Amino acid sequence: MLNNTTCLENLNAAMLDLARSDEKIIFIGEDIKAPYNGAYKVEKGLSELCPDRVISTPISEESFTGFAAGLAMSGYKPIVDFMFSDFMTLGFDMILNFCSKYPDMYGVELKLPMIIRSANGGYRGYGATHSQSMQKYFMGINNVFVFEMSPYHDNKKVFEQMLNKNKLCMFFEEKSAYNQKMFKTDEENLFKVETLKEDENWAHISTDSNRCDVSIITTGGLSSMVLDCALELLVDYEIEAEIFIPSQLYPCQMSSVFEKLKKTSNVVVIEECNYGANWGSVVLSELQKLQQGKNLIEKINLLSSNPRSIPANTKLENRVLINKEKIVELIANL
């Protein structure tokens, strides 16, 4: 059933299932009530299902972030919708100075089950203030977990996992992934997808061959682009690639993936965030720790978007953001 749905449909179904299963879950955000139903219609059907638990707010990100935190302190489980992740900076004070500190600043462990989710990233020509990949700004914050929507992870399971952490979780939904089919690989059926038995946080895409020339570690939003690159590399260059995609980006748990990397000496980390102090840097750091004294990986490369404001012109946007041409060129020349 999942194979016939898009990421957006799967996400909407997850919201509805969560609302049915737990009356403590409350939905908060700008224009999330019908008929608008939130940006990209993620909240479609919620107003009819549980009207008292769907709260449309004014344009007041810091206020409704604090409001949601107060509800979480009181035993509720708020799921907060930011229209675009670029606007998360407006709620950053509440996130950093309250939500991250509340669980352990009073000498006892306290619960703060809360999710902030948002449309994220570029490739839509929306310009500099509506196209950023904001994940990097929430990594390294104590008691804050960072997740990204993936076509290879069922959203309901991911949201249940986030709520069970009883701490603030940030969930980023790449706009480019909304219309991707769940668990779809390539039309030629050369690649297959599986979840790592050692760690269900990781999806693994590979061919049936025992050979592997390069291991690619990337995020859910780029998974379709990277899979297209892997197919091109296989057909045009006879380079066999495997792909690893996490649901949880931070804290970054690489041990189970590192065990799989033993069969290849080349690793490429690819992300949409711009270069500098980003998720890719965290992955490289974790791999280096695991690699220490073993020297199993000969080459590790990081591909990120250029550190520039993102243009609204789609051709210029493509030059700034990571793209297929850059990925294929790097790997073909390893």
Image (cartoon, rainbow, N blue to C red):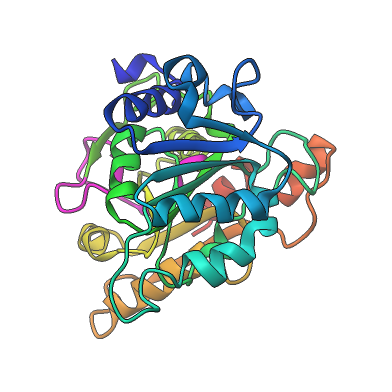
Q: What is the x, y in percent for residue 246?
A: 36, 50
Quarter where residue 292 is shown: bottom left
Quarter where residue 325 is shown: top right
* Residue 245 falls within the magenta-colored stretch: no
Residue 126 vertical placement versus 96 (above, below): above
Determine the residue positioned at 60% across, 17% down: 34
Q: What is the x, y in percent for residue 316?
A: 82, 43
Residue 274 appears in the figure = no
Residue farthest toward the bottom in the current orientation of the protein? 293
Which image quadrant: the N terminus?
A: top left
- Exactly how many numbered labels are in the figure? 0
Tell which of 147 and 263 is nearer to you: 147
Give the residues drawn in magenta, as a range. 196-221
88 relative to 328 in the view: left or right? right
Residue 102 vertical placement versus 165 (above, below): below
* Residue 214 falls within the magenta-colored stretch: yes
131 relative to 154 in the view: left or right? right
Residue 280 vertical placement versus 180 (above, below): below
Determine the residue positioned at 31% across, 24% down: 20
Residue farthest toward the left in the current orientation of the protein? 197
Determine the residue positioned at 45% across, 58% down: 268
Determine the residue positioned at 46% across, 30% down: 53
Residue 288 appears in the figure = yes
Q: What is the x, y in percent for residue 143?
A: 40, 68
180 relative to 183 in the view: left or right? right
Q: What is the x, y in percent for residue 304?
A: 60, 58
